[in-house]
Image (cartoon, grey):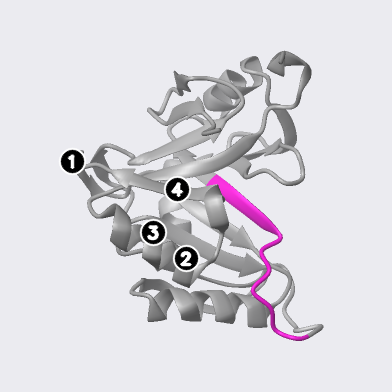
Amino acid sequence: MDITAHQTSIESVTLEVPDPAAAAAFYVAAFGLGDKVRVRASETPTTGFRGFILSLVVSQPSTVDNLIGTALDAGATTLKPAKKSFWGYGGVVQAPDGAIWKVATSSKKNTGPATREVDDFVVLLGVDDVKATKQFYVDRGLAVAKSFGSKYVEFDTPQASVKLALYGRRAAAKDAGVPPEGTGSHRIVIGGNTGPFTDPDGFAWEAAPA
């Protein structure tokens, strides 16, 4: 099959963790994202901010509270408690394996019964040069959906797949509520229908698992 005729899609993200069994159990209990989140063993050194945020976009505040609640019950820690802001409602937690998760909605009011439904799963990469990394991805066949100069870029991916966005590293860390410093491995691998390759900030892509 010739993938060049198809839109670039991200099927899953793989988190490299010290204890895959514990991490897998956490993700089932916390968010229930199925095979969009995979884990595998790694002891690669990493310190501080790993350079990415995994963002769950939902329809209303009760869904934010529901997902953050199950994540905390499963062992996550709070980085930013869920609260209202001028753009909506959301909070940030850190999984036991160190990955940072943001759960947010643009709605400030509940419009229906509480659910656990996730509308969008976004991999937000904190990068050193948003414009240069945007061009790198455009050259690999990703179309830009939204772009705010050198601040933020969101790529156009098919409906069912994981979305990809770029943010300046310092801005991403501020959004997550952590210091921007960090060294070593990102400990995340993006599985898509393009690649394998490594982007300018060291984020690795592999062919999506069959």
Calculate the distance from the C-alpha at mark 3 to the C-alpha at mark 2.
6 Å
Q: Position of residue 178 (x, y in %)?
A: 34, 59
Q: Main secondary structure of the magenta part?
A: loop
Residue highlighted by disc 3? 24
Gap between marks 4 and 3, in whole Å? 7 Å
Q: Is residue 119 magenta?
A: yes
Give the mark toward the camera: 2 or 1.
2
Disc 2 is placed on an element classified as helix
- N-term-proximal mark, 2 vs 1: 2
Relative image position of residue 121 (x, y in whole percent)? 61, 53
From what the image shows, is residue 204 above or below residue 41? Answer: above
Crowdedness near tag 1: few (<14), some (14–19) or many (≥20) residues, C-alpha within 10 Å: few
Query: In 3D space, how far apart are the residues under numbered discs 1 and 4 (Cα atoms)?
Result: 19 Å
Q: Please state which of the two labelled residues, at mark 1 or mark 3, is closer to the viewer.
A: 3
Q: Is residue 75 left or right of residue 151?
A: left
- Observer-nearest residue: 178 or 55? 55
Look at the image and give the residue range highlighted in magenta: 113-123
Q: Please name the amino acid that badge 2 sits on.
A: Val
Which amino acid type corresponds to the residue marked 4 in the rendered image? Arg
Picture residue at 60% right of the left edge, 49% below the top: 122
